[in-house]
Amino acid sequence: MKNFARSIRPTVASIAIFATVSVGIIAITSPSPVSAAVKQNKDFALDDQWGLQVTNVKDVWPIATGFGVIVAVVDSGSGPNPDLDNNLLPGRSIIRGRVGDDTSDVDTTGHGTHVAGIIAAQMNNDIGIAGVAPNAQILPVRILDSRGDGSELDLAVAIRFAVDQGARVINLSLGGKNQTSAVQSALEYAASNSVLVVASAGNGGPNAGTTYPAGNDLTIAVTAVDQTLNAPSFAQRGSHIDISAPGINICSTIRTDITVNATRRCAGATEPFLNMSGTSMAAAFVSGIAALVFSARPTYSAQQVREVMVATARDLGLAGRDETFGVGLVDAYAIFKSLGYFPDEVVFPTVSSLGHVGEESVGGTVQIPESERLQWYRCLSPGEATLVIPTDCKAISRAQRPVYLPTRKDINAFLRFGTLISVNGVPQLRFSATTPKVTAIWTSTSTMEVGGSVAVKDLVVSASPGATTARVVSGSCRIAKNVLTTFEAGVCKLRIFAQAKKPYPKLSQTVVVTVVQKV
């Protein structure tokens, strides 16, 4: 039997269980999806859940919250956690062929609880976070031991168990180098019963080989993106990757009896919530969105749900499907719009930009009527998408195409992409949200591993040809002999510089590099 490992990059150096808590986990009736969605949300960390924002999940909660859908989390177990317990069904433990029920599915490492919270943490309960599908139910199936290892035979049994228990989605945030015929047969069993299997692509980095079951065509393989919608350094590549989802600094539930340094928690310095990073987290986002679709369209097959997610994904990287991002970022709003919702919703042009001089900013008009005119604007302050002409924005001359290359004139400004369309015969201007503040100096990566190092000359990128330098402001890193080295998970704050070379002035910028734990 081949060993599997969880696909995770926690943002802490270590986590330790200091007490064992055994609880009987019960299922209770969830509130109706509409009534839960329309109440004022009081989840403590909702506004900090960047993954919900970029995938537009909150836009579809008035329509679907996962009510009536079971998502099986085949992992290290799930719970206990007060933000999750009411959505947990009695599960099962399958370790080395030994099967146990109920309390034996309690999480042994914290990984499964974190994954389950991303999918279905409760909404509107005055604590913590909200899951992608906050009224879905989690079926925890524990196959990973306290070290995070498991066997393919147990995985095959777990997949079949989840199907037989009525799961519509099976989340597999784990993987290995090979696959047995038993797993293949189990995946075929899931497909024949129209159960969608979501698998994380792995954290071995761009040169690692394909992991399974993500490499199997019967799963939807998910890779991770960071807050700038770039691929983190640990994300694996390959033609098998189907779709992308948030996977850096994701705040979610952990076991209540796991002790962590307070500064590494999220949703409160003493509460059982933690930021973690990895394709494990990305897979959970896709599983949660699949639950939303099944909730709104219970007669849909797994293939239909898969196809609508793939067809509506926001393209990233190279045009079309590629080996880094698959088809692109999963987009809940685009999915539900394609299903016939939001027919009268006002939609705006979009803009994809890192705010770097000399690097393309791309305007998007896919979701709006055909434009009669395109125009880029230079603005003094940031802002959301709008129908009102921003008073602090000026049109940029000779910038009337979808792609714009920021110049030194744009330094410290914010860019908008504007369109002129016809709505019922009436001309209407629509403006995108602004880009990040434009800079002529930045870093080549926003994420590094603990113990990683990079030469400052390779880390600091500038539009100016002048020499670059950097100094550490604070955090878990140091610079010696012009090499940046990281030594602890957390954040590394740097001040970066580029010498003045005409036509640029001396450039400087304070930046943050996230340091994540190695697998």
Image (cartoon, grey):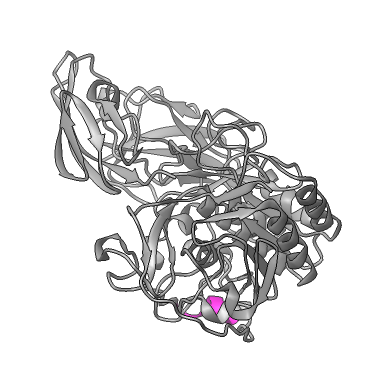
Residue 139 lies within the magenta run? no
- Above or below residue 330? Residue 324 is above
Q: Position of residue 313 (x, y in %)?
A: 62, 45
Give me the residue at 53% from left, 63% from top.
Answer: 112
Give me the residue at 38% from left, 58% from top.
Answer: 275
Give me the residue at 44% from left, 71% from top.
Answer: 255
Displayed quadrant of residue 158: bottom right
The C terminus lies in quadrant: top left
Residue in the foreground of this view, choosing between 497 and 183: 183
Relative side of 297 to 211, left or right: right
Q: For the stretch drawn in magenta, what is the main secondary structure?
A: helix
Relative side of 126 to 165, left or right: left
Residue in the foreground of this view, choosing between 171 and 465: 171
- Above or below residue 86? Residue 117 is above
Relative side of 422 to 459, left or right: right
Give me the residue at 48% from left, 70% from top.
Answer: 130
Number of dots carrying numbers: 0
Q: Residue furthest right?
A: 192
Residue in the foreground of this view, choosing between 122 and 110: 110
Bounds of the magenta span? Answer: 35-40
Displayed quadrant of residue 410: top left
Residue 502 visible at all: yes
Residue 338 visible at all: no
Q: Position of residue 148 (x, y in %)?
A: 52, 56
Q: Position of residue 508 (x, y in %)?
A: 16, 31
- Above or below residue 301? Residue 323 is above
Q: Position of residue 37 (x, y in %)?
A: 55, 75
